[in-house]
Amino acid sequence: QVQLVESGGGSVQAGGSLRLSCVVSGYPHSNYVMGWFRQAPGKEREGVACIDRDGITTYADSVKGRFTVSEDDASNTLYLYLQMDNLQPKDTAMYYCALTPRDVETKAFILNPPNLGAHWGQGTRVTVSS
């Protein structure tokens, strides 16, 4: 059973930084696309950043230049990271890690993960105060 567990959320002031981590267990395949998604109170979930095993990335326009997604599959454990700099109150949300074993482009996964067989974590909360 595939499990994704996020960590690293917290409360920061505007202009601060956080680094989110996601550890994946029980994933037997060599191919993947992974990504970070977020949902603010009263809003729909949106894609933040995605990456595939070749390092190809896609970012939402709202985070370009501030967030950096990366992955590490060198060990037997798969990790996904999101470095978030210059955080703003608009970034306040629950952040979720997701993975699909399907051979899809990151620009597709960031738009519609449920239709692409995504596995999800439980989320980690990020709160940015002004």
Image (spheres, rainbow, N blue to C red):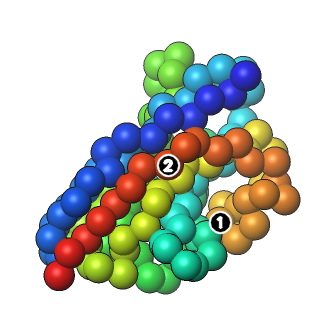
Can residue 19 be seen? yes
Q: Is residue 82 above or below residue 107?
A: above
SS for dot 2: loop
What x and y, as percent, mark residue 43? 57, 79
Q: Disc 2 marks which residue?
A: 123
Farthest-out residue, top: 76
Residue 7 percent coordinates (x, y): 37, 41
Q: Nearer the viewer, residue 113 or 128?
A: 128
Image quadrant occupied by the C terminus: bottom left
Query: Disc 1 vs disc 2: Cβ atoms closer than 8 Å?
Result: no
Instruction: Say how many tags the image has.
Output: 2
Q: Which residue is at a point 66% across and 61% down the rendered structure image?
A: 106
Q: Find residue 64 and report its horizontal and vertical position in percent.
A: 41, 77
Q: Secondary structure at mark 1?
A: loop
Q: Residue at x 49, y 73 (%)?
A: 41
Residue type (three-letter) at the residue carrying disc 2 = Gly
Of residues 106 and 25, the one nearer the viewer is: 25
Q: Indicate the quadrant where residue 31 lies.
A: top right
Place residue 99 in its image quadrant.
top right
Say if 78 sits above or below 126 in the image. above
The quarter in which the N terminus is drawn is: top right
Q: Nearer the viewer, mark 1 or mark 2?
A: 2
Q: Is residue 127 above or below residue 30?
A: below
- The vertical placement of 85 against 71, above or below, is below
Q: Residue under label 1, please give it.
A: 110
